[in-house]
Amino acid sequence: MIKRIFYILCLITLNSFCGFEVTQPDGKKIVLKDIPYGGFILQRYNSDGSPDNKFTSFSYTWPGIKAQAIKFDKRSNIYVYGIMSKLPITVILDPKTADTFIMRFEPSGYLDRTFGNVGMMVNPRY
């Protein structure tokens, strides 16, 4: 289960940066950082704050995509939730018209390509 989710920083500008941090039961922190104009970076840190070299950092850059939340399950799979522009792709996202997505990552940080369509589900039905 998620111990804590911290809202690190979110500036509502065209150069916005948003970040989220989740602490795993072992004390390691998974950090999700937004990339301005579309995309995100997924990283993990040891409990002492040093980068976890056993975790493969993931960077996903795509215009019109914004990560909004991070969560993990009992198997330590990592889920990233967010919104993305409908076609044509636009840089400024309107949450009322945007599609939603979920991406799943293995505990090692690799994208789980067995999930959805090569690791991503668009407009998942709950």
Image: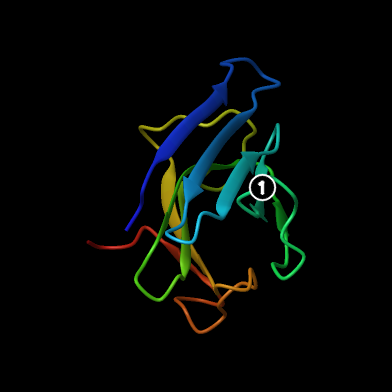
**Residue 30 image offset from top left, x and y in percent:** 57, 52
The C terminus: image quadrant: bottom left
| Residue drawn at the location 67% of the way across and 53% of the way down | 43
**Which residue is at the far left?**
126
Please give left or right for residue 30 compared with residue 46 in the image.
Answer: left
Depth order, front residue of 46/6? 46
Depth order, front residue of 32/6? 6
| Residue drawn at the location 74% of the way across and 49% of the way down | 50
- Which amino acid lies under the numbered mark 1 shown in the image of this protein? Asp
**Residue 16 image offset from top left, x and y in percent:** 64, 23
**Which residue is at the far front?**
48
Q: Is residue 88 visible?
A: no
- 110 vs 60: above or below: below
Depth order, front residue of 56/120? 56
The N terminus: image quadrant: bottom left
- 6 vs 74: above or below: above
The residue carrying pointer 1 sits among few (fewer than 14), some (14 to 19) or many (20 or more) residues within 10 Å by Cα, namely few
Circle 1 sits on which residue?
A: 48
| Residue drawn at the location 46% of the way across and 33% of the way down | 6
**Residue 53 image offset from top left, x and y in percent:** 77, 65
Circle 1: element type: loop
